[in-house]
Amino acid sequence: MIREYETAVHYNAWSNPGVTCEEKMRVLRLDNEEITYAMAVSEEGYLMHVYFGSRVADEDDILYLLRIAESPYTPHHHLREKLAFMGTRPFEYPCHGIGDFREPCLMLMDADGMSAVDLRYKSHRIAEGKPQLRQKGVSCLPATFAGKNEADTLIVTMEDAHAGLTVELYYTIFRHKNAVTRAARITNHSYNDTRILRALSTCVEFEGSAYDMITLNGAWARERFLSRVPLHAGKQSIDSVRGESSHQHNPFLALVSGDASEESGEAYGFNLVYSGNFFAEAEITEHGNTRVVMGINPFDFSWMLRTDEEFVTPEAVMVYSDAGIGKMSRTFHDLYRENLIRGEWKDRKRPVLINNWEATYFNFDQDKLFGIAEQAAKLGIEMLVMDDGWFGHRDFDNSSLGDWVVYEEKLKGGLKPLVDKVNALGMKFGIWFEPEMVSEDSNLYREHPEWAIQIIGRELTQGRAQYVLDYSNAEVREYVYGMLRSILDSANIEYVKWDMNRQLTEVGSTTLPRKRQRELWHRYVLGVYELMNRLTTDYPQLLLENCSGGGARFDPAMLYFSPQIWTSDDTDAIERLKIQYGTSMCYPVSAMGAHVSDCPNHAVGRVTPFDTRGDVALVGTFGYELDVTRISEEDRNRIPAQIAKFHRFNPLVRTGDQYRLGNPFSDDCYDAWMFVAKDKSEALFTFVRILATANMPSITVKLHGLAPDRRYLCEETGQVLSGKAWEKCGIIIGVNRDFTSQTFYLKAI
């Protein structure tokens, strides 16, 4: 619900120094059952942030938070001086160059080389539901969606009359989720070109600075490791300048109260629906307050706006919880499962697949793949995915990207004979692509070297012996998509793994004009979105899984196109505890690609029990990454039971509420979690011992999320307790061996 009202306030206006005025201030509020987001228009026309948090009753006047009656400190303290005002007050979309020296959202360069922007309130309108995020000339901008009964949207139009510029600020509040989304549309109405140097998506101002900042950081094979540190004076930020959202930092940031735990305290989560260079920052100001901003990274970015052209920022998702970090995460999970992920597979259990990458790498042919499929089908596996090495003349990673034609020496007769044989086993068939890349040793590069991202005259930097195709070029996109369609139409392919294995360097385009070269970072991402949107539109039954060297593009925008993303190339069950724990801060487990892999593990060399690998992979899409024809008979015989366990519990894991009951980043030497059905009728609890501890015979883990007054039977122990007893007294775990796991199923009776 969105409300507007006016209230009288008193302060000294700088337009008439020394005179006390009574003026009207317009307040705009977004409310649902649990949260309020409020802003106000000052006398001078500035849009000021008032409040974001737990629901404030409609009759309460919260404008006092703006402290409008207080004059900002100046040598003449009785004057309301603009410079001091701009430098201290909380703004909804702060601009550069007019006295606010904190981190701005908007910075432009006009035809005269000037960069100041002064946005004032012009008007607003309210829409039921959530209008689709669109930009003229752009085919697809990923964003959350909602019907008329699910959300309300406020669009505030701001204007800089001097620059001939309008900015529309989009706010959507979801009626039954504690989430607000934001985006901005910038339009040039002047007769001169304007260059955007910075256009962030959101800014929220917080009273005080007593917060911890949670971020998700790492590297290849250890993505989204959780970091929690207290804020300090100055600026603390995360970002990507790699052309992707990156292994190193995820476009997620949370501010939590210092005492916040999983189940108590305040938590504010921010997540950017974007797959390229991003920037997120928390800044403690000189007056001890905190400003959080998030959006496209302004580093090496600009965008030319000609007359009547527009630019739309990616959407930022903001979630509030007054009941701990866990509730924040569960809100993100529900929002993304219900209002971001689309298509045929949105609410469906995914097929149990086996991927041949760690089983064979490049060393396979049709007979080898069919042998794996034949054994896998007997065990209950439902899909064979053929990974890298099936195209061009690719026997290693130094050739053939861009030549999306079948490698006949491996697959005689093309794809169809193999796919038909696999289908005859009752299995689906999937395939791996890396459509954004080109090898130097490829027909495509020999014919069109100008299609690679490059700075003419500079040596190109190789990564994995490959270059990046210029997806800002429509001719490149059309050519690549034509090759993809040719392969997909040649056989019954029901799954695609879309990979992207290197970052962008020498970022230049042979087709963009000189004044638009710095747009390439963003235009590249828009080109990727266009192709993914075409793919999922033309092949609506296709199950698309995103991958970027593992988890380098695990972001909300990718979820808009694919219901699952390969979480990490590190498939070790114990390493995955940290990776999946961090990922669950804002992403649902239904989106996490997770497989049972071989041992010793190919990433870390660790040996873990087959059952533990299965229990950890259940927290995800579930599949296998090994050669079932070569593993031990003992392990192979465990696969049917693991698959049966997946089929039984995946509906609960995929749709239920997740509770993190352990922390693999702590010193407790274990991890634990549970999934509780929305109606509280059942729950699945999992415990993983990381390292055994001497003289510690048992551990008690307290459960969460059950209905306090209902009684639950634990299937494994036969014990019956109330939900309140399970929460207060917990479940006793007797396992004390390294890397072992146990699961417990609780059913309301």
Image (cartoon, helix red, strand yellow):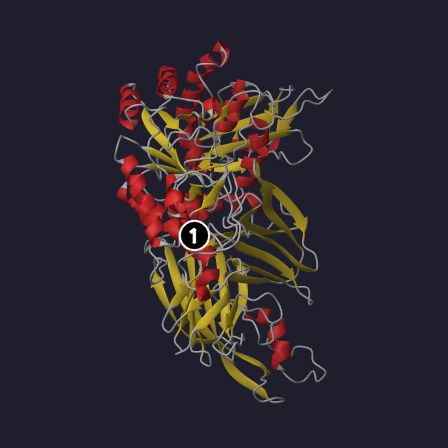
Residue at the top extreme, as displayed: 633
- Residue 373 picture location, percent across and down: 36, 19
Foreground residue among 281 and 264: 281
Q: Is residue 165 left or right of residue 599?
A: left
Look at the picture and state if 743 lies above or below 239: above
Give the quadrant of the N terminus: bottom left
**Relative to 332, does residue 494 appear above or below in the rendering?**
above
Q: Is residue 650 above or below residue 114?
A: above
Q: How many marks?
A: 1
701, above or below 63, in the image: above
Find disc 1 in the rendering and name its residue. 525
At horizontal 45% and vertical 57% (from top left) the residue drawn is 520
Q: Nearer the viewer, residue 726 or 613?
A: 613
The quadrant of the picture occupied by the C terminus is top left
* Residue count near mark 1 (Cα–Cα under 10 Å), binned few <14, some 14–19, many ≥20: some
Helix or strand or loop: what does disc 1 sit on?
helix
Quarter assignment of residue 4: bottom left
Residue 158 coordinates in the image, percent (x, y):
44, 73
Can you see residue 587?
Answer: yes
The foreground one among 476 and 223 is 476
Q: Is residue 530 left or right of residue 102?
A: left
The percent coordinates of residue 367 (x first, y second) are: 36, 17
Residue 745 visible in image:
no
Given the image, on which type of amino acid does mark 1 rest? Val
Q: Position of residue 724 (x, y in %)?
A: 55, 33
Q: Picture quarter containing residue 392?
A: top left
